[in-house]
Image (cartoon, rainbow, N blue to C red):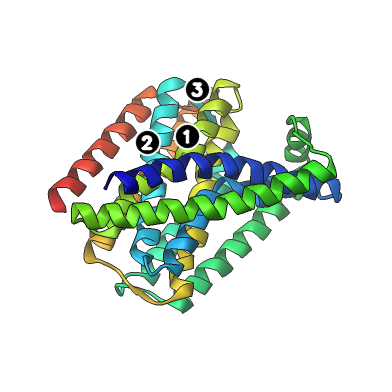
Amino acid sequence: MLLAVSMILVGFIVLIWSADLFVAGAASIAKNMGMSPIIVGLTIVSIGTSAPEILVSITASMSGAGELAIGNAIGSNIANIALVLGITLLVAPLMVQERCMKSEVFLLLVSTFVVGQLILDGELSQSDGWLMVALLVFIIARLVSQQFKDPGLLEEAGDEPERLLPPGRAWFSFLVGLVLLIISSKLLVWGAVHTAQELGVSELVIGLTIVAIGTSLPELAATIASAMRGHTEIALGNIIGSNLFNLLGVMAIPGIVATHTLEPAAISRDYLTMTLLTVFLAISIYISRMRSKSSVGHAYLGRTLGTLLVASYALYYYSLYTTM
């Protein structure tokens, strides 16, 4: 038991550190090759922030622990909205741009309901997985197209400070980060599976709790840092973008590897909780936009919402404990 917990802790630490190396290297390689900063941000960096979840999902699926991968995807999305966004709002209010509601939030809502329909039969099949990946590719293409149609967004992207590594260091950072991501994800999955066996709980619950919170730490750090620096749109975008990748990319992986039968609670309790939180976030953003239009001010998500989100996460954890 002690060894398994140690592997989880070591896996988390190395996973988060190696993800940063991987993103820095991959982004620098792309920029050195002449790729537009906005495309780098929407593809490589967005995928990179979900790298821990992606690698854990691949490793778990290939190890026959598909429930752990599914729990990780759903649990990470719950943690991102209720815990990461909740804590961030307690630190600093976030300003909401109108385009956020019209594009990213709308796409997240649609994706949530589409995936919900796919798994309503109690299975995550290979065809479901490929459909989810196809939807993710479509969304990325749509977002890239929208960014190029809005000159203001391109100017904003150009104003962001960039950490550009020289070619040699970029490739070294990329390769070392990738290798460490693979090794650390294997350590984490091994530790999580053995902890589940020792405690007598399902791999789904371990994925929803320990693994989900651990793999959401990069989002928590990045979101709070963005909010503290005044980049509030980036902070909210981090969460929405990460949830899109988790839902359509990370959750698709176990289905692509092999068809998985979902525990009834995974749909009726966990996916439903994720859906309700997503809808609640969308409604909160919409209300804040309506209030700002009537008062001719900026739309903000504030500490009241943050308190409600953190409280909802505590209630969700309580429901997990009482239904295990």
Do labels 2 and 1 touch, CB within 8 Å? yes
Task: Compare marks 3 and 1 and give the one earlier in the sequence.
Answer: 1
Check the image and name the residue furthest to the front. 3
Q: Amino acid at mark 1?
A: Leu
In this figure, which residue is indicated by the disc labeled 2?
83
Q: Amino acid at mark 2?
A: Leu
Q: Nearer the viewer, residue 182 or 271?
A: 182
Determine whether the residue tagged by mark 2 lies in a helix, strand or loop: helix
Task: Compare marks 2 and 1 and give the one earlier in the sequence.
Answer: 2
Q: Which class describes the residues within 10 Å of circle 3: few (<14), some (14-19), or many (20+)?
A: few
Q: Picture coordinates of residue 86 (x, y %)?
A: 39, 31
Q: Which class describes the residues within 10 Å of circle 2: few (<14), some (14-19), or many (20+)?
A: many
In this figure, which residue is indicated by the disc labeled 3?
295
Mark in the foreground, 2 or 3: 2
Task: Give the CA separation, mark 3 to mark 1.
Answer: 31 Å
Q: Picture coordinates of residue 287 (x, y %)?
A: 42, 35
Do labels 3 and 1 touch, CB within 8 Å? no
